[in-house]
Image (tube, rainbow, N blue to C red):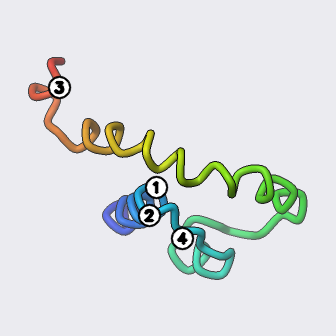
Amino acid sequence: MRALGELTAREMLLSAAVLDAAEMKQRGFLNKLVPAALDCIGRISPLAPQAARLNKPVLSASTRPACARGY
């Protein structure tokens, strides 16, 4: 299950993929859809391309062994 979560996270972060609620539920990210959360979508969606650029180095660093990161 963790590998599927990581693959979905990478897909979303690196390709700025926007998955609908049904897809997110199928992938195990949602238990239910809360209508109030829909208000956030309009504010978050435009930030996706910039967020993808910023997340690339974070994802790269998180997959390297701790010794390679200097810890």
Circle 3 residue: 69
Expressed as whole percent of the image width and height from the top left, the position of residue 55 reads: 42, 43
Quick check: marks 2 and 4 in contact, CB under 8 Å? Answer: no
Circle 2 residue: 15
- In front of the other: label 1 or label 3? 1
Residue at 35 percent of width and 65 percent of height: 7
Residue at 59 percent of width and 69 percent of height: 18
Circle 1 residue: 13
Local secondary structure at mark 4: loop
Say which quarter of the image contains residue 65: top left
- In front of the other: label 3 or label 2? 2
Left or right of 24 in this view: 60 = left
Q: Residue furthest left?
A: 67
Quick check: marks 4 and 1 in contact, CB under 8 Å? Answer: no
Local secondary structure at mark 1: helix
- In front of the other: label 4 or label 1? 1
Number of on-image labels: 4
Say which quarter of the image contains residue 5: bottom left
Expressed as whole percent of the image width and height from the top left, the position of residue 12 reads: 48, 62
